[in-house]
Amino acid sequence: MSGGVFTLVAGRDLRLAGRRRFEALLPVVFFIVAASLFPLGVGPEPQVLRQIAPGVVWVCALLAAMLSLNTLFASDFQDGSLEQMLLSRHSAVFIVAGKALAHWILTGLPLILAAPVLGVLFDMHANSILTLVAGLMLGTPVLSLLGGIGAALTLGLRSGGVLILLIVLPLCIPVLIFGAGAVGMVDMGLSASGHLSLLGALLLLSLVAAPPAAAAALRISMS
Amino acid sequence: MNRSIRLNMFAAPSSFYALSGFLLPWLWLIAIGFAVAGLYIGFFVAPTDATQGDSYRIIFVHVPAAWMSMILYLVMAGWAVFGWAANARLASMVARALAPTGAMFTFLALWTGALWGKPTWGTWWVWDARLTSELILLFLYLGFMALVESIDDVRRADHAGALLALVGAINVPIIYFSVKWWNTLHQGATISMTAAPKMAATMLQAMLLMTVAFWAYSFAVVFMRTRAIILERERQAQWVRDLAAKEAA
Amino acid sequence: MNVSCRRGQEWLFRDFSFSVKPGELVWLRGQNGSGKTSLLRIVAGLSRPEAGTLTLAGGRPGAYIGHANALKDDLTVTESLVFLARLHDLESSAQGIRDALRTLAIHHRRHAIVRTLSQGQRRRVALARLALEREPSLWVLDEPFDALDVHGIEAVNRLLVAHLARGGSVLLTSHLALGLPGNLVTELELPVEGAS
């Protein structure tokens, strides 16, 4: 029964985003623009770019994922939909999970698809790009899940956007380290399986722990 | 410090106010006394290090400050969660009072870490695993304070801070582990006491004295801050009005 | 139920006791700022009272409709009602939705995007959900007649009477006089608490 609300909420969020397609694409545009600034700042030398690429792509992915977090709950909060969702017989955990899934499909997935483009811009080797994408596949859901907690805590606050960054970014640092580190390993000719396994572990931990935490945060913010 | 003895203190803000007021002068006395003793031993009595000369002496402030920064975060998270779970207002007030002090110690640890790094490595900052973790801890403190200050509704702010502190506390080991991993992968520099198998007894003494001093200082400052928060939040209560009237007279 | 509630530093109401019986409609009255909305939110389960107990059959009200309509601007009327119906485990078949919209006389706009509707029309869509409710539960309604015209008010009144007839109960606020038979309505005044 509660699983039903998960697909109900996720489906509704996706349908809503489909009616505002341009806004849904903004994070990806930011991702590409922001990453492209680095060669302009650092110089176009391929060796340097190849070295900084994993870090740059990951940091920009982090920031792009955070950008759309502000609106995760904000619209529903303002028009009373969130109240209705919390009042239903369904667990808030599944509602939050549904929203996180929609957020990942709308933000994380496009980032994963855009990453190879950046890989090419930064002259990364094919193996590195593959590892980058694999890491992003494991890491971007974690960002959506942790971001849900931040968005729930800062519901309705004036300073919401930047505050979410300050709260959530430190928590995302392990993802950044292991994700970029995985590519670094491959660049050195070593295996990235250790890093990717750790990312997988973080993903599992977030899947289990983040939705309940975000649900609790929603209750706090709505009371 | 054994907090269970003092649990009755947290029954009411007014009794906490009275009891803390009584304890404050003693706490300051302990803090200053132990600090003077610790610094004296650290800077004058402890022997010169074989490899680092006299510049290592900053660790007598750096290490206790780092310990305090980490412990205070856990204490803060603990009281905040207790205030949330048991709906205990005073516990939440104490948590809020702890945050600035914890952040201060984190900053002190970072700053003294830089002072240590300069003569040792020639740079003001080194991305050493422990220093980097301290930096992230500072971000966690700042995030807590920013969140709590941004929410107008006091109880919502208390509870939100509690959840954030709890999430942060759970993440601290993960963050520390990942930073260590990152540091060894990139073969970063490490600031530590090099190779001495046993720390000279006086060095240990000095660090312990400084730790006690920092503990007493923390108690004193947190008590003072909590008292201010109590007065502000409970200003409608009769005992506060009586107090204000007495002060004005 | 016996509840107390604070807003910020002030008490909104202390030790306020009342009960709502099956088949009863309680009209909560009080001055602006006396805490009517806060009380309704406590009864609905959205906030916790500072002190006191709340006893409800089934643990929660059957429906709560607050000031906000809970409608998304970018969805159609039908899509919005279907979402609310599925969310609250109500009937969501195409026929059922159409009938509910028809009850509130908004059926003709069922494919319109919510953004294009007037305030009164949106309120009708929000209230159409009540037409899908079948259980004799407690309805908690905050200013349900807001922005409605005479016909809309009549439609809602019909829904309320039908709900009371099957043993349900209603707790609502309204700054307008209720057009319901006097024997169904109990007035309840929420006193303004002075600063203590």
Image (spheres, grey):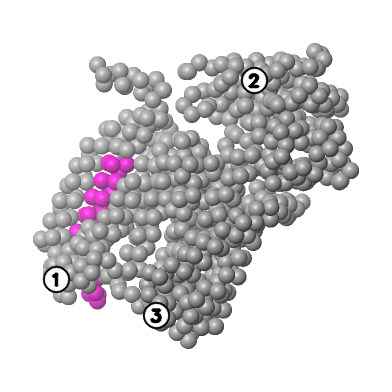
Q: Are marks 2 and 3 on the same chain?
A: no
Q: Are marks 3 and 1 on the same chain?
A: no
Q: Any magenta on residue C42?
A: no
Q: Residues within 10 Å of mark 1 (few under 14, many from 20)?
A: few
Instruction: Tell whether C118 sits left or right of C33.
Output: right
Of circles 2 and 3, which is in front?
3
- x then y, percent, for residue A201: 56, 68
- x then y, percent, for residue A215: 60, 48
Residue depicted at 45% across the width and 71% down the height = A55
Please state which amino acid type lies under the numbered disc 3: Glu
For label 2, the residue is: C17
Q: Give, as a single range, the part of the protein colored magenta.
A: B193-222
Residue depicted at 25% across the width and 58% down the height = B111
Q: Residues within 10 Å of mark 3 (few under 14, many from 20)?
A: few
The chain that hosts pointer 2 is C
Q: What's the mark number on residue B53?
A: 1
Q: Residue furthest left?
A: B44
Q: Residue furthest bottom?
A: A189
